[in-house]
Image: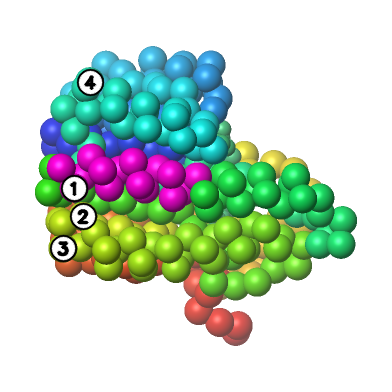
Amino acid sequence: MRMQGKSVIVTGGASGIGLASVERCLEEGASVVIADLKGSEGASRAAELDGKYAGTCLFKACDVTDTVQVDRLFVETVDELGGVDSVFNNAGIGGVTPSDEVSDEEFLRIIDINLSGVFRVARAALRVMYRQGSGSIVNCASILGVFGQSQTAAYTAAKGGVVNMTRSLAIEAAPKGVRVNAIGPGYIDTPLLEALDDEMLQGLISLHPIGRLGRSEEVANAFLFLASEEASFVTGTTLMVDGGFTAGKS
Ligand SMILES: NC(=O)c1ccc[n+]([C@@H]2O[C@H](COP(=O)([O-])OP(=O)(O)OC[C@H]3O[C@@H](n4cnc5c(N)ncnc54)[C@H](O)[C@@H]3O)[C@@H](O)[C@H]2O)c1
């Protein structure tokens, strides 16, 4: 059991990559808080998982754009689980709009969730983890944190920001016993891709040398590695989980 007795928070844990990560952590002996906007979905996922494994699974409603809610999530988790060993800073939204048509509102919303939200959660995590003298934060970036893509200026800016913010946080937190890393998923078969038609999906598949989309569990396994003591000398990095997407063209 790689996460025996550990306490983990997964933002965006009600769906997709987050939900798979919640289940992998429970399988490895952790207690996990699903933190998500989706109240009824999150609560029913937690109710299904709680009692299935040795650890507890709780749901806490949390919008990562709201500092009060984020800070409360950490206070309550410390009260109920005794601390926070690992955080998957995974909540995020997509956004594809021609740049000449993007409104301020849409641009700022994507930044607020995908970049500022990651910072709010990391800041709250650092406060708890500094007191503990230990912890691991894993931020969800993307292949689009290191590659550009048409019509995704806000998303790519946010994810690029996550990659470099991860480095800065890692340097700052290392002397206090806290590691900070990121994951860069390629295209993963989750509800985030629901809006795409078959032709678009085939186009995306062809960009991955492995020849398929990724599975949420494959990203969850990378989170598990970075969250656990197996990655005790790994900080400030972005681990690409992308079927070779960022390796180059064939
Ligand atoms: N699916 C992909 O191809 C892909 C690729 C690269 C990166 N990612 C990243 O992976 C992460 C998870 O995406 P997914 O594919 O599992 O998507 P998903 O839509 O299945 O899950 C995202 C979850 O985040 C939650 N969420 C959204 N806004 C929130 C907010 N303000 N506060 C709290 N929770 C919020 C949603 O309710 C949802 O449960 C995101 O950061 C996404 O950018 C996904």
Which residue is located at x 75 percent, y 45 percent? Answer: 105
Q: Which residue is mark 1?
A: 130
Q: How many marks?
A: 4
Side of 186 where 222 appears, left or right: left
Percent position of residue 180, x then y: 30, 58
Are circles 2 and 4 on residues that touch, CB within 8 Å? no
Q: Give the vertical position of 214 relative to 120 (above or below).
A: below
Q: Horizontally, is 143 left or right of 175 in the view? A: right
The answer to which of marks 4 and 3 sits earlier in the sequence is 4
Q: Which mark is residue 175?
A: 3
Q: Are marks 2 and 1 in contact (CB under 8 Å)?
A: yes
Q: Residue at x 77, y 62 (%)?
A: 151
**Magenta-drawn segment:** 117-131
- Name which residue type carries label 1: Tyr
For the stretch drawn in magenta, what is the main secondary structure?
Answer: helix
Whether disc 1's CB lies below 8 Å from ligand 1 is answered no
The numbered disc on residue 178 is 2
Asked whether the viewer can see residue 21, the reply is no
Label 2: state its secondary structure. Answer: strand
Mark 2 or 3: in front is 3
Q: Is mark 3 within 8 Å of ligand 1?
A: no
105 vs 122, left or right, is right
What is the spatial separation of the Cα atoms under label 2 and label 3, in whole angstroms?
A: 7 Å
Q: Tell me which label, 1 or 4, sits earlier in the chain.
A: 4
